[in-house]
Every structure is written in C-alpha cells, then in structure tokens.
Amino acid sequence: MKRKSAFLKIYTSKNANPNGSEFIEFFNTENVLSEETEKICGGIMCIDECKRALMTMESNKTPGTDGLTSEFYRFFWNAVGKFMVESSNYAFQHGSLSISQRQGIISIIPKKNKNAEYLTNWRPVSLLNVD
C-alpha cells in the first residue's frame, strides 16, 4: 500500500479543478497564430518539408509500437517518403490519424542511480511512432 500512495502522490494532478482560476485563465488566453504562421503550419504537406522535419529528429531513440525509428525512415526515405506524406495528408483531409498514428505506449523506467524499490524513483515515458 505504501508504494501505491507514493505513486498517487507523484502522478496525481495538483490542480484538477476545471472551475479553478488557473484552468480558466490558461484556456481563455488570446494567443493565436498570425495569418502567415497559420498558412505555413496548416494545409497539405509536401515531401521536402517532411524530409526536413525527419532530418531534425534525434537518433538512437526507442521506437514506438511499430518498431520503426527515425533512422529507418531516413535510410529508406526514397522508398517510403511518398507514402508517408500521402498518409499524413490523407489524415489531414479526413480529420483523423490512423490507429497506429494515434497509438502510444506509456512505460515506466527507473531513474539512474536510484533505488528501484521505490516508485518515486521511476518515471513515465511515452513511446510514440515516428510517423
């Protein structure tokens, strides 16, 4: 029971009141994208901008549920790039990502040099697919 209460203490929201002033203030902000930024960020993607984004991703990261890393996509970009962009644009046009694009795994891993017997010495990590 001691471990469960430690876990709840760490991962329970401190401000879960949707009527609280911090919550209302956060969601009532007037921050919006400029028209220029909105044009850049919205709409159909082209293969070059997707490749540029892929090239900025870090290497040596744990893959998501499909097991494919950014290194895989970089190496096989000429073969799969067109299909990746078409898939992303299809999702944009239809307003929904595929199941694998929406899927992730939340896992807990031990903190370095900490006693793994205590839940306070573990941290959650989300594993998402590159696509």
Image (cartoon, helix red, strand yellow):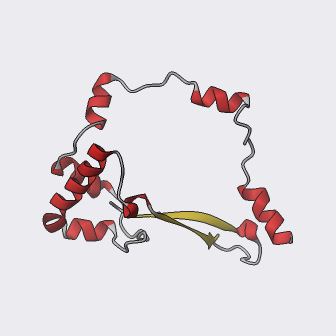
Q: Is residue 120 left or right of residue 50?
A: right
Which quarter of the image is occupied by the C terminus? bottom left
Say which residue appears at 39% left-offset and 62% top-offset. 99
Instruction: Residue 20 in the image: state x and y as whole percent.
Output: 73, 31
* Residue 68 in the image: above or below residue 49: below
Instruction: Residue 15 in the image: state x and y as whole percent.
Output: 73, 41
* Residue 9 in the image: above or below residue 89: below
Say which residue appears at 71% left-offset and 57% top-offset. 11
Going by the picture, which residue comes out furthest to the front? 94
Looking at the picture, tell me which residue is in the foreground, 57 or 114.
57
* Residue 111 in the image: above or below residue 8: below
Say which residue appears at 35% left-offset and 23% top-offset. 34
Q: How many marks?
A: 0
Which quarter of the image is occupied by the N terminus? bottom right
Looking at the picture, tell me which residue is in the foreground, 84 or 112.
84
Instruction: Residue 127 in the image: state x and y as whole percent.
Output: 48, 65
Say which residue appears at 18% left-offset and 65% top-offset. 80
